[in-house]
């Protein structure tokens, strides 16, 4: 599951890392980056709401393979370099990749000791910064050596190869699948009801919305933002990679703290305040700021906005009914996709109106601040 999510994170991050080259090649405005990721978020939202029945019927490992294949197809389509193909890339790649987290949560949720679930899920989720690190390091280098089209195709091929490598494990890890389970349109509504109707899951849904909004804005716009401050694509990608590397130990530390040392809800509250404050600091950066200062701010964002997943997903899995972890996790994450959908649109509008990235960073960090306050009040109530 770690390697599966590493490839997923790599493929999903590449359009953001390579955005300057793609924008220049297709003569697009940088505000359209947000539109691309908003389309991907819409597809992800629908997929995560409806994937529960497919996970139960075909198995978590099979659906992990499906996620990898669809992501590969999406990346391949983007290389055709037309607006229509980019839309299809976002829909197919974004929608397909979204199955990966509910699938891995379903698989790990049934084999992990409850007490150590925050740590287990955090270890698995370190794959996301690992994928972002690879995207930031290798993406610009391959693009300079060849072009962004070949970089996307290399990543797509890697996803296909790993899909085949997973096949021998299917019999072992999909032994709980129910072949008679069928998909119904009502599954979307049922998943929403199961999430909204439970207080703990409802609170986690709002948290997912805010945290995904902050994470998406940083991932999508940070490299482009640095290029406006005078950085080259390779230099910006390097700073991005070094920053996201912090999320690897960060996720493990938060997961360890949430596994019996600190109440997981308080861990999430601290992360909420941290990401809101660091995003505010990022908005103040200017062309004359030292790289070490900008890198430190980015590292704090990485340690918070890119490091909450393990604690969060373990809480969602714990709150889910037995046998429904994949569906419930998908439902909770669907609210996160709403954050990933709304935030880039708001950022793009603000960027278009003000021609400034600063306002967008500030506005999109406000939900995290509100969630942090709510989590503290809920704990002390």
Image: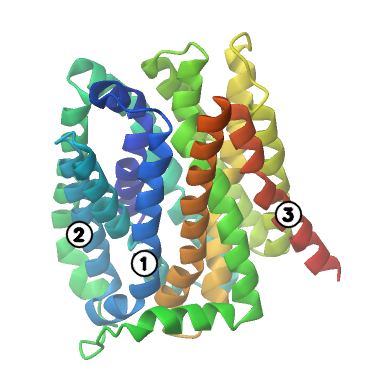
The percent position of residue 3, horizontal first and vertical second, equals: 31, 50
Q: Which residue is mark 1?
A: 46
At a point 40% along the width and 28% down the height, the residue shown is 30
Q: Which residue is mark 2?
A: 166
Q: What is the quadrant of the N terminus in the image?
A: bottom left
Tell me if residue 363 can be seen. yes
Label 3 Cα crowd, 10 Å radius (few <14 / some 14-19 / many 20+): some
Which label belongs to residue 333? Answer: none
The percent position of residue 377, horizontal first and vertical second, equals: 82, 64
53 left or right, relative to 79: right
- Indicate the colouring scheme: rainbow
At a point 24% along the width and 22% down the height, the residue shown is 25
Q: CA distance from mark 3 to mark 2?
A: 41 Å
The percent position of residue 101, horizontal first and vertical second, equals: 39, 61
Q: Nearer the viewer, residue 282 or 123?
A: 282
228 left or right, relative to 266: left
Q: Nearer the viewer, residue 350 or 63?
A: 350
Q: CA distance from mark 3 to mark 1?
A: 26 Å
């Amino acid at each position: 599951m770690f390697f599966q999510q590493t490839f997923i994170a790599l493929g999903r991050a590449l359009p953001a890392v390579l955005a300057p080259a793609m924008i220049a090649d297709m003569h697009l405005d940088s505000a359209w980056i947000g539109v691309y990721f908003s389309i991907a978020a819409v597809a992800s939202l629908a997929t995560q709401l409806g994937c529960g029945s497919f996970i139960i019927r075909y198995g978590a490992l099979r659906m992990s393979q499906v996620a990898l294949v669809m992501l590969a197809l999406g990346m391949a389509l983007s290389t055709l370099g037309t607006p229509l193909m980019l839309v299809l890339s976002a829909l197919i790649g974004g929608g397909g990749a979204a199955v990966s987290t509910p699938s891995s949560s379903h698989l790990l949720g049934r084999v992990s000791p409850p007490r150590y679930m925050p740590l287990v899920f955090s270890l698995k989720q370190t794959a996301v910064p690992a994928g972002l690190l690879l995207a930031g390091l290798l993406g610009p280098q391959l693009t300079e050596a060849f072009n962004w089209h070949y970089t996307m195709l290399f990543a797509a091929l890697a996803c296909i190869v790993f899909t085949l490598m997973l096949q021998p494990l299917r019999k072992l890890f999909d032994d709980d699948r129910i072949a008679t389970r069928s998909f119904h349109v009502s599954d979307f509504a049922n998943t929403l009801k199961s999430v909204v109707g439970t207080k703990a899951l409802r609170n986690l849904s709002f948290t997912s919305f805010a945290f995904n909004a902050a994470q998406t804005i940083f991932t999508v716009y940070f490299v482009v933002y640095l290029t406006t401050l005078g950085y080259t694509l390779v230099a910006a990608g390097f700073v991005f990679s070094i920053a996201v590397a912090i999320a690897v130990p960060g996720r493990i530390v938060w997961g360890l703290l949430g596994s019996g040392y600190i109440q997981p809800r308080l861990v999430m509250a601290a992360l909420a305040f941290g990401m809101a404050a660091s995003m505010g600091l990022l908005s103040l950066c200017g062309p004359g700021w030292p790289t070490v200062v900008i890198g430190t701010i980015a590292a704090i964002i990485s340690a918070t906005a890119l490091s909450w997943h393990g604690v969060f997903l373990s809480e969602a899995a714990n709150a889910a009914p037995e046998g429904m972890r994949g569906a419930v996790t998908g439902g909770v994450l669907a609210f996160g996709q709403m954050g990933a959908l709304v935030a880039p649109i708001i950022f793009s509008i603000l960027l278009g109106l003000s021609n400034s990235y600063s306002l967008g960073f500030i506005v999109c960090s406000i939900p995290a601040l509100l969630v942090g306050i709510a989590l503290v009040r809920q704990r002390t109530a």
